[in-house]
Image: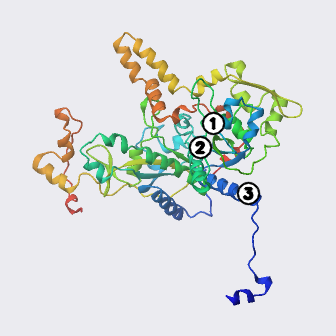
Amino acid sequence: MKARTKSRAKTDPKINFSDAKTQLEAIATRSGAAVCGVAAAAAFGAAPEGRRPADLLPRAQSVFVIGGAQPRAGDWQSPNYQHMEVTTTSDRIQSLALKMAKTIEEKYGYYAVCVPAGVDLGQQAFMSIAMAAELAGCGSKSLAGPVLHSTLGFMYFGAVITTLPLPADGPLENPVCPAPECVTMYEAEGVTPCTRVCPIRSGGCLGGKIEKWPHYRARV
Amino acid sequence: MSHKFSQPLEHAPEVQTLTIESVVASRTRKVKEYALKTGADVVGIADPARWDEFAPESHRPEAILPGTRSVVVVGARGPTAGAWRSANHRLMEINGYDFRNDVSSHLVADMIERDFDHQAMQSPSLPTSGHEPPLSMMLAAVLAGLGTRSLAANIILNPKYGLLYYSATLSTLEMDFDPLLEQDVCPHPMCVKSFERFGKTPCLAACPSDDGGCLDGSISEEGRIEYSYFDRERCVSRAMNFGINSFQKAMVQIVTEENEEKQEKMIDSDFFTRSCSAITHYKESVAQCFECMRVCPIGRAERKLK
């Protein structure tokens, strides 16, 4: 039997996918996203089988990632830290992701699925949205856990899997974390601000070490 | 000023005669355009008097908003076409419903009060006591000419989109009404042929009541629904596994469990986790089984993308 090597994806010759990406980013930004990026669906090889884009949407080509709904500067200043538990949830970005999925279908006629923020069987994520954010160049994993954006830091992410073949951004070349000042602190004290505030050795959640990396000092 | 009157008569600005009919038609158009702009896929307007024939007095628009003169019904698609194609059907349990119809309905009510100085409110569609909703959204959709009842769990199918979620706005604003659909949406001609040949339609075959399912029915020689049966209790046990009911049931089992280790496992279980998630996010508890709709040919063309 002859192996099927050709992609079965049908593309619309009338659509300029680069323009489509720009338009989608403009819609997302206008609707509240702080950052946008695109990951290639094929780039999720590190994800477990069953948790990759094509497992959720046959013939998936791209993953459109949006980020935002981050706590405001005022939120971080509040002495009542509990208020952030209720005012800065990921719901806003999830709603926007659902809107973007519908926009892709209605505007371009390609299939789109919003990756649910809830959990699938075994309390596993349907697909790692953090991984999608990294592969779309929206940020990189941090010592503190979340994917951090290079200028805005912590935020919430949403992901839309689609058969629309958008040009992929790919992961960042330079990781966002550790920041140069954290490296300096680590060199002096053996901890970073985050690993110090919640040290795993004293009942906290975080630990880690920073490897020698020649480029960090050149970063802004 | 004199030059104004020196123009030949044929160049004088055209004066539009405002009649009550044109004012009502204009506001009806504006309300409908606004509903579509704010997320609805379809919109229809029903005369509140249409309820008199079908609903008890306490479940009519007048019982909810005294002086109701129009009922604006909006319908919105739930899952994306991509979600229907997903091999992981659990995805639709979470993303099957996005409340777009509710959002649109609220915004339409705001618009009517703001722009037309008339009272408006989103009609309550969930039971406030007992199990009967104050106003049936299914009946509202039919009476606004947006769809007709189907063999598949009595779901009101729209001729273009098939399954839709509906919300209604009651208002004291007079508007033009849409006619009821003249033709039944269900059964689809393909389903009539299927019934003639196999004695089943796709939905009846997907969930047959004589084989543990929820549906049964027949189609007359004229191609109309002759008889339909929907086992709501069975359907609930499949379509609403997680939500208020499952949370209540699990709580009783957890608090009465004497073995502490088992109790902890029950709390950490998938079942209880998803029940908690369903009641906190709510939309997860709306529908967890789409199988009769997955095979329905109505609206399928709208779900065919690239």
User: Mark 3 and 1 residues: CB-CB less than 8 Å, in contact?
Assistant: no
Identified at 62% across, 33% down, the residue is B290
Q: Position of residue A32 (x, y in %)?
A: 44, 55
Q: Is residue B175 left or right of residue B38?
A: right
Q: Chain of mark 3?
A: B
- Mark 2 or mark 3, which has the lower sequence index? 3
Q: Quadrant of residue B187?
A: top right
Q: Nearer the viewer, mark 3 or mark 1?
A: 1
Res B121 label: 2
Q: Are marks 2 and 3 on the same chain?
A: yes
Mark 1 Cα-neighbour bin, 10 Å: few <14, some 14–19, many ≥20: some
Identified at 22% across, 59% down, the residue is A215
Residue at image mark 1? B64
Residue A51 vertical position relative to residue B114 in the rendered view, above or below: above
User: SS of the residue at dot 2?
Assistant: strand
- Mark 3 or mark 1, which has the lower sequence index? 3
- Tag 1: residue type? Ile
Residue A45 vertical position relative to residue B151 in the rendered view, above or below: below
Direction left: furthest residue: A188
- Mark 2 or mark 1, which has the lower sequence index? 1
Q: Position of residue B255 (x, y in %)?
A: 40, 15
- Tag 3: residue type? Ala
Residue at image mark 3? B25
Measure how far apart labels 3 and 1 are at the Cα level. 25 Å
User: SS of the residue at dot 1?
Assistant: helix
